[in-house]
């Protein structure tokens, strides 16, 4: 009986091994998500370095820049 209790609850027991396995599964999933995010960011960096359209898009959307001759329309909401 004591041997069974130790096999389950001891620091090297079955429950601890199960917890480690679950933690490993969780870490593998997190690593995969980070790997995907890194791949996306690498593509974005490459695009920013090489694609003039991407640079222009960011300049227009985030920096509110425009080319000479462009007409800019701003939509203003009125609150009543």
Image (spheres, rainbow, N blue to C red):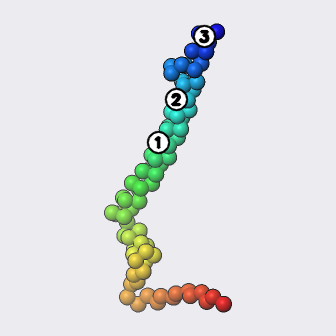
Q: Secondary structure at mark 3?
A: helix
Q: Quadrant of the N terminus?
A: top right
Residue 13 found in image quarter: top right
- Please tell me whether residue 75 is drawn above or below residue 60 in the rendered image: below
Between residues 14 and 58, which one lies in front from this camera angle? Answer: 14
- The single residue placed furthest to the right in the displayed view is 80
Instruction: Determine the CA span between mark 1 and mark 2.
Output: 16 Å
Which residue lies under the disc numbered 2? 20
Q: CA distance from mark 1 to mark 3?
A: 39 Å
Q: Secondary structure at mark 2?
A: helix
**Image position, residue 61 (x, y; %):** 45, 75
Residue 71 placement (x, y as % from top left): 46, 89
| Mark-to-mark CA distance, 2 and 3 | 23 Å
Q: Which quarter of the picture shows residue 56?
A: bottom left
Residue plotted at (63% across, 88% down) = 79
Task: Give the mark nearest the N terminus, 1 or 3.
Answer: 3
- Nearer the observer, 5 or 56: 5
- N-terminal-most mark, 2 or 3: 3
Which of the marked residues, 1 or 2, is nearer the chain's N terminus?
A: 2
Q: Taking 28 as reference, is 67 left or right?
A: left
Q: Which residue does the image show at 41% across and 68% down from the upper left?
A: 54
Which residue was labeled with disc 3?
2
Give me the disc on residue 73. Answer: none
Residue 47 location (% of width, % of height) = 39, 62
75, above or below 21, in the image: below
Secondary structure state at the residue bearing disc 1:
helix
Q: Which residue is mark 1?
A: 31
């Amino acid at each position: 009986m004591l041997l069974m209790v130790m096999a389950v609850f001891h620091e090297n027991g079955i429950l601890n091994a199960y917890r480690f396995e679950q933690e490993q599964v969780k870490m593998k999933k997190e690593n995969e998500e980070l790997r995907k995010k890194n791949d996306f960011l690498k593509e974005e960096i490459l695009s920013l370095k090489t694609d003039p359209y991407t640079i222009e898009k960011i300049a227009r959307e985030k920096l509110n820049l425009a080319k000479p001759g462009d007409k800019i329309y701003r939509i203003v909401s009125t609150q009543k």
